[in-house]
Amino acid sequence: MPRWKLITVAVLSALPVVLFAGFGGWALYRSGHWVWLWWTLPVCWGLSGILARRWAGDFKIPMPEIDCSQWTPQDQEATKIIAAEQARVGEYPAQQLTNPQFYTQLTQDLALKIARHYHPQAKDPLGDRSVVEILAAVQLVSEDVEDWFLKYVPASHLVTVAQWRMLSHAPTWWQTASNAGWVASIAMNPLNIARYVASKVA
């Protein structure tokens, strides 16, 4: 779906909510009942921010279970190399994670490490493999990645490559929206500045 169509659908979906919230807030302010409800915005947002930070560390996408009962000790050591690479994912900036060339290079580097684990003198991880073996491995991995992507990435069947690259800017957008929300809540009630400081310290 083109970007302008996604934006159109998003605007049409959000517009009634924004209008109801805007006019409802104005009506509450004019009627004087705003005094009883002003605290809900900073308290709920502050609580959601604290919970999101605490729970974010617990979130893990389930990986498929692998039967390793037939593995040799050398095979089990090879999985530690892969696990070490998986643990490094937090070191990469978002721009790299949306670049297909990054994954190509990462795959080649990992293949060389695995090859040297089994054959210390290896210089080419694929030199001794047949083309059919490589194609079979690519097919298996592609099927697994497709299933994982469709299951765990919302609207993944609609995402284009350009939109995928655009997601690298999402952390910046979230930070900007969060800061704008805090500015608005502080403007309505200066006491919220204490909650803002507390949320940054937490």
Image: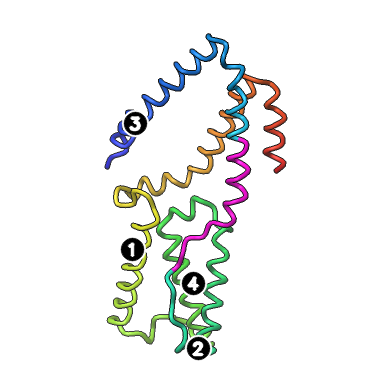
User: Residues under labels 1 and 4: Cα distance?
Assistant: 25 Å
Residue 100 position, x and y percent, is: 40, 58
Comes first in the chain, label 4 or label 3: 3
Looking at the image, residue 46 lies above or below residue 142: above
The secondary element bearing badge 3 is classed as: helix
User: Residues under labels 1 and 2: Cα distance?
Assistant: 32 Å
What residue lies at 48% left-to-right and 43% top-to-bottom?
A: 169
Q: Which residues are magenta?
A: 46-63
What residue lies at 30% left-to-right and 48% top-to-bottom?
A: 158
Task: Verify CB contact (< 8 Å) between mark 2 and mark 3.
Answer: no
Pick the front one: 5 or 24? 24
Comes first in the chain, label 1 or label 4: 4
Task: Verify CB contact (< 8 Å) between mark 3 and mark 1.
Answer: no
User: Residues under labels 4 and 2: Cα distance?
Assistant: 15 Å
Identify the amino acid type marked 4: Asp
The secondary element bearing badge 1 is classed as: helix
Q: Residues within 10 Å of mark 2 (few under 14, many from 20)?
A: few
| Quadrant where the image shows the N terminus | top left
| Residue behind mark 4 | 109
User: Residues under labels 2 and 3: Cα distance?
Assistant: 57 Å
Identify the amino acid type marked 3: Ser
Residue 165 position, x and y percent, is: 41, 48
Comes first in the chain, label 4 or label 2: 4
Residue 62 magenta? yes
Comes first in the chain, label 3 or label 1: 3
| Residue behind mark 2 | 119
Residue 12 position, x and y percent, is: 32, 28
